[in-house]
Amino acid sequence: MDGPQAEALLAPLRQAVRHQGELVRKLKEEKAPQVDIDRAVAELKARKRVLEAKELALQPKDDIVDRVKMEDTLKRRFFYDQAFSIYGGVSGLYDFGPVGCALKNNIIQAWRQHFIQEEQILEIDCTMLTPEPVLKTSGHVDKFADFMVKDVKNGECFRADHLLKAHLQKLMSDKKCTAEKKAEMENVLTQLDNYGQQELADLFVNYNVKSPITGNDLSPPVSFNLMFKTSIGPGGNMPGEFTMAEIEHFVDPSEKNHPKFQSVADLNILLYSSKAQVSGQSAHLMRLGDAVQQGVINNSVLGYFIGRIYLFLTKVGVSPDKLRFRQHMENEMAHYACDCWDAESKTSYFEANKGAIGKAYKKDAKVVMEYLSMCDECYVTEMEQLLNDKGIEQGWQIVLKLDSFVSNGAKDVAKGETELVEFTVETEGKTFTLTKDMVTVKRFQKTLHVEEIVPNVIEPSFGIGRIMYTVFEHTFRIREGDEQRTFFSFPAVVAPFKCSVLPLSQNQEFMPFVKELSEALTRNGISHKVDDSSGSIGRRYARTDEVGVAFGITIDFDTVNRTPHSATLRDRDSMRQIRAEVSELPAIIRDLANGYLTWADVEAKYPQFEGQETGKKDTIEE
């Protein structure tokens, strides 16, 4: 649907969000009862969800991945599978196969390069187990919970909101469902996240929700905390592993300017500010420097890390067109945070895969700062003579006066940095003269003051599994004109294998070159895969494309027959090929994989391959 038609449908929804946002602001300004504010905020969130769902529904369908084909490719080529699948599997736990493991490791290594090495961050590796007092302080114990219902006969558990949603959608799909009843259920679905325990229980009764598997009655909803208790030591159960990456970048509260911000200031990023959400507006592209200058983003340190995260995510394969940064509204933030942004990516589930970047104010992290400085101390060298000549009391008054006039020129006189040869001091109505030879400057170090501060900290955090799934969806492709040929367009930096080495056939004349290239690639640290099976070269190209191998080297009869020996290099995405000397290929692929070269650079330098010119028995020297 085109812009004007879509906007006409969205306008009343935007207006509804805007009106509710104004009501929330008014209630807060008037210091209304908290229960009224909470109710208004819940309604605002519900209206936002309706608006976002409509926006997604109106977007072109051609940018939605064929998830069935993608998941078939992922499982058939063993990127991953459900853990313990031959025993029925365990929900939420996965095993990564060879290519999935390589992809995951490459994403982690790209993260290390992008942040730890380039930002000179110190890395630590922490346990995934956290004691309860820590999670209690952070709010996870009290707030991270879902409502569950249980089959009263066999004890099987279901998440209440998911089950209710599926049940209502089934009822709404019934042709006998009236328009009035359908509207009622749609209203329930928009409010689903806002219902409490008793409200959910009433809805289960009203809509007669049963177990979807057995048809048995269900228990009333009960709160189920998402923090799992784990025993440590003999007899303890090992929990499922997951990979997180997080940065703790501490900031002086009085100095929130990042020296490298200008390197990302010109990035245009899709931002969805809290103000836009409350006003019913859409996310819009904004120059990062302007967002900081206008106060949309709190400060340049936070802005710098938003820019760096954007660059990292797009580097590893997240599509810039399906990525936005959404600012948390006040009621969403953790109790210790004063600003927070989520990097959200669009997937076929129409739900955002989130990675948080927040500016948190750590109330429990005090730091004592001792400021050391090199100082200049002035003292009178002819002290004894001065005291004798002027009297003890007045002499010491002169010495005390030194503290107040050091900054006014005495220091410069002593160092000979001015044309003055004497300096006057007044005390008790009398004037005393200090000459240059009477004042000495001594340089020393001392503590000027000690101060306790509470530092700000920028906390970018990344769920590697979420990033991996997003990369799968955003890089999945189907060859034009051949619906059966699927492939992953992974960026070379994270591709499981950087290149393949393919002899044109099983002819033994090709094997020395295959061995030579494989050894050279290994010396250059390039992951590669040799496929010397009997399949046609086209079929083997398709196999390597399917697992996302970025480039392919083919050894043909021109390699054997011509000197200097050359081979073809194929780009996975465009399927175009060039021809280069065998000795040059490892360095070319290394530079492509590290981002030092683009395929366009390679095509500009080397001749395009259009077909081999010699056959099995030809030998040509140049």
Image (cartoon, helix red, strand yellow):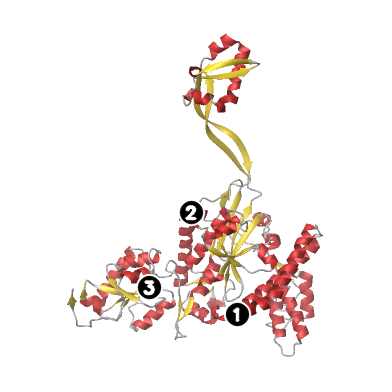
Residue 117 image point, x, y percent: 45, 55
**Which residue does the image show at 57% across and 81% down from the upper left?**
61
Is residue 408 shown left or right of residue 215? left
Please tell me the numbered disc located at residue 545.
none
Q: Which residue is mark 3?
A: 551
Toward the bottom, the furthest residue is 176
Q: In this orientation, which residue lies closer to the viewer: 2 or 344?
A: 2
Given the image, on which type of amino acid does mark 3 rest? Phe
Of the residues shown, which amino acid type is indicated by label 1? Asp
Local crowd at mark 1 within 10 Å, few (<14), some, or many (≥20)? few
Image quarter hosting the C terminus: bottom left
Give the camera-side residue of 107 and 322. Answer: 322
- Rendered location of residue 320, percent (x, y): 52, 69
The percent coordinates of residue 326 (x first, y second) are 62, 64
Disc 1 vs disc 3: which is toward the camera? 1
Q: Dot 1 corresponds to which residue?
A: 2
Which quadrant of the figure contains the N terminus? bottom right
Residue that extends furthest to the right in the rendered view of this protein? 33
As helix, strand or loop, the secondary structure at mark 1 comes to: loop
